[in-house]
Each structure stands twice: as C-alpha cells, then as structure tokens.
Image (cartoon, rainbow, N blue to C red):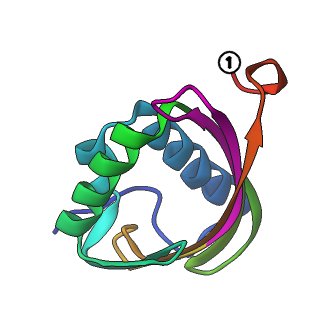
C-alpha cells in the first residue's frame, strides 16, 4: 500500500510539513511528482474544472505548466483538523505573450488514511500585474 508521510490525524507540526511538501512539489512543476501525492481516485475542483483520478490530475498539471510560465507558488496553512486542511496560496506566472499574473486562492484538502490527498477543492482568482510588481522571483 502506497503511503505519503506524514499521515493523519495531523498535528501542527505535521500539518505544516504537509503544506511545505506540497509547495515544494508544485514549485518543481513536475506533473508526475506532484500527482503522486494524490490518491488514485482523487477528486478535484480547480476553478471551474472538475478532475477525477490521478492520471487526469497529471494531464491537467502538464497543460497548466505549459500555459503558466515561470510559475512560483507560496502556500500557507490556514487551519486543520484530523485529516483535513485549509490552505491559502498565491502564485505568480506569465503567459506566452509576457503578461504577468498573481493568482490568489484557497484550497480545502482531505487526506485518506495513507496520507494521500483524496479531495482538493480550489477557488482561484487571477490579477494582472506588471513584472516589476512580482513578489516571488
């Protein structure tokens, strides 16, 4: 059985660790690496996209990072209980035309007993910014 440490129920220390691991993985921009943190039957809502299953997540992320160039993300634990977490995040990226964006959002996470994320619900808003306004370089 595949596991992804730390396992729930989470403590403050392990919840912070899980969030940092997610931030590091997403900043790798490696769809394979990122997708392995999710259960095979994971359920996502990402903006208006409904994504089901690890393979679909992998394909979604591949397309995301083909469009969102020079992506850099920061996550922050907002709260947690047992096997659930609330996380706020912001990330910066630019499109192929060179327009920079800062994307803000909140995620609700639910983990299975093996520490794999089985549910991820993300609400995200994008703000056009100038390159000189970037926070994450």
Magenta stretch, main secondary structure class:
strand
Left or right, 76 with reference to 82: right
Q: Considering depth in this image, is 48 or 25 the residue closer to the camera?
A: 48
Left or right, 90 with reference to 21: right
Left or right, 70 with reference to 102: left
Residue at point 51% right, 29% down? 97
Q: Secondary structure at mark 1?
A: loop
Q: Is residue 29 above or below residue 107?
A: above
* Residue 11 location, quadrant: bottom right
* Image quadrant in which the N terminus is located: bottom left
Figure disc tally: 1
Residue at point 41% right, 55% down? 5
Residue 90 image position (x, y, % from top left) = 71, 47
Residue 75 seen from this side: no
Residue at point 79% right, 27% down? 135
Residue 114 image position (x, y, % from top left) = 33, 71
Q: Is residue 32 above or below residue 3?
A: above
* Boundaries of the magenta span: 90-107
Residue at far front of view? 97
Q: Residues within 10 Å of mark 1 (few under 14, many from 20)?
A: few
* Residue 31 location, quadrant: top left
Residue located beneath label 1 in the image: 137
Task: Indicate whether residue 132 is drawn in magenta.
Answer: no
Residue at point 73% right, 21% down? 131
Q: Is residue 82 above or below residue 14?
A: below
Residue 57 image position (x, y, % from top left) = 29, 63
Residue 92 image position (x, y, % from top left) = 65, 36
* Residue 107 location, quadrant: bottom right
* Image quadrant in which the C terminus is located: top right
Residue 94 seen from this side: yes
Left or right, 69 with reference to 77: left
Q: Considering depth in this image, is 128 or 24 the residue closer to the camera?
A: 128
């Amino acid at each position: 059985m595949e596991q992804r440490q730390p396992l729930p129920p989470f403590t403050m220390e392990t919840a912070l660790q899980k969030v940092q691991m997610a931030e590091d993985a997403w900043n790798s921009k490696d769809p394979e690496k990122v997708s392995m943190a999710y259960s095979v039957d994971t359920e996502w809502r990402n903006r208006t996209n409904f994504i089901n299953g690890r393979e679909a997540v992998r394909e979604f992320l591949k397309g995301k990072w083909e469009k969102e160039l020079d992506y850099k993300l920061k996550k922050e634990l907002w709260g947690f209980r047992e096997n659930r977490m609330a996380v706020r995040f912001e990330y910066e990226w630019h499109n192929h035309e060179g327009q920079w964006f800062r994307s803000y959002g909140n995620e609700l996470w639910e983990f299975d007993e093996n520490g794999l994320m089985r549910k991820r619900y993300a609400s995200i808003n994008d703000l056009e910014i100038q390159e000189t306004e970037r926070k994450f370089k």
